[in-house]
Amino acid sequence: MIAVVLLACRREPSSTDDAPAPTTADTGTPGDTFREPPIAEDLDPDPSVVHVRLRAAPLAYEVDGTTIEGFAFEGSVPGPTIEAELGQVLVADIVNDLPHPTTVHWHGLHVPAAMDGAGMPMPTIEPGGTFTATFELTQAGTFWYHPHLDTAHQVDLGLYGAVVVRDPAEPAVDRELVLVLDAFGEEAAAEHDPHLVDPTSSRWAVNGVVAPRLSLPAGTRVRARLINASNAGMVALRDQRVIAHDQGLLPTVVVGDLLLAPGDRAEVEWDVGDPFDVIRLPWAVAGGEAWGEPSPLLTVETDGGTAPPALAWPTREESPTPDPGRTDLRFLLSGSPELGWEMNGETFPDVTMPMVGLGEEVVIEVRNVSPADHPFHLHGHAFEVLSVDGEPPASRTIEDTVDVPVRSVVRLLLLADNPGFWMTHCHVLPHAEGGMMTMIEVR
Ligand SMILES: [Cu+2]
């Protein structure tokens, strides 16, 4: 198997070049060496500003022996990771060298509406055009950027990258890792049909490498930042020590299985002692029993030794907010692959836009009556999950993307504190483009 992602003009100077014997392309066979996306260069010496360039252009790259005639930011899939600290201003020069119009959306970040890269009218960047996004980073956590125009096509072909916003008050670990997850289907990729690259989630890549091997010394404490950048694939991981969800550190650590729907992020702690696999569990997107076998998403290699004790993350006395009982906004998710996908019985863009007052606390109920899971995502805001089918979460959790399982009801508490027209949609991108999308006006 050939090493990973081809960068436009340079090879990765990593040990992947002399990686040992090729392995088969079967899911779960430990593959090439783990790699991380490049770090976006900060072009501004001003310590209060992070100024990056994101040039989107076509790129042929390889995943697990399959060449994808794709797209990339700065010649890399995933695109460069933007690293910043809480309170810094991000300036991103977006250059569109694609043969199509595009935008960049800052998933999970509370940006002004004009910077969101989405909405109506769509703030399109034409081929050959540029746009500079500027906003302050007011939340610590793991976020990501991706186009919001012809989204299923452009994201699927490789246009995505991580945004890491650090709070210097959070505890330090030995090693931080960014893991951008995407799924690649064999057959479809070979046909270069972008809309079908990850329909079956058959092969999962971590930063462009399927089932990579990561070598770490025993005693290393890792903070791993996970992003599900796939179009439609669910990632269920066995038995993780979960320290953060979409919007940063949880008030209390949760140990257990972890589900990442498309668009979701989570952060986990690994205390490295003996070698271990990060195990991906089968997940039934249509509900009911899942079929298939657990398989390694990633293998951590080490000589073995004593694991460090789990870190005592700052614990906050925060219980989940009790459900106020009322419902201010309702979203009914319905449809089917055959009939198309609807929100409140409507298909985007022919939708009725609800309006909420700026500063209002809004109780949202999302009910899924369709035969598939739908990750509900709202732009420009975050919400607390009050309950899933009546059950409050194990730890108070603030999200911008939450899976609404088949035949389930998810209740959310939103503080509508960001004025504008905000898209809300299913983050299974073919569902969103099939019509499961609407907008909320906050004014
Ligand atoms: Cu959906």
Image (cartoon, helix red, strand yellow):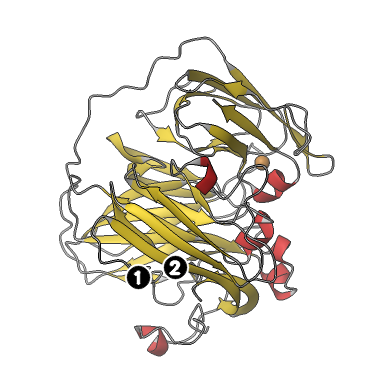
Furthest residue to the top? Answer: 325
The residue pinned by badge 1 equals 41
Q: Nearer the viewer, residue 37 or 260?
A: 37
The residue pinned by badge 2 equals 53
Discs 1, 2 touching: Cβ within 8 Å: yes
Question: Which quadrant of the frame does ligand 1 lie within?
Answer: top right
Residue type pointed to by label 1: Glu
Left or right, residue 371 beside residue 30: right
Say if residue 212 shows up in the picture: yes
Residue type pointed to by label 2: Arg
Q: Nearer the viewer, residue 393 or 39?
A: 39
Confirm if mark 2 falls within 8 A of ligand 1: no
SS type, badge 2: strand
User: Total number of numbered labels?
Assistant: 2
Residue at left 40%, top 14%?
322
Residue at left 57%, top 50%?
117
Residue at left 19%, top 37%?
314
Say if residue 228 shows up in the picture: no
Residue at left 60%, top 29%?
441
* Whole-percent x, y for residue 62 in the image: 57, 78
Task: Locate residue 43: give its quadrant.
Answer: bottom left
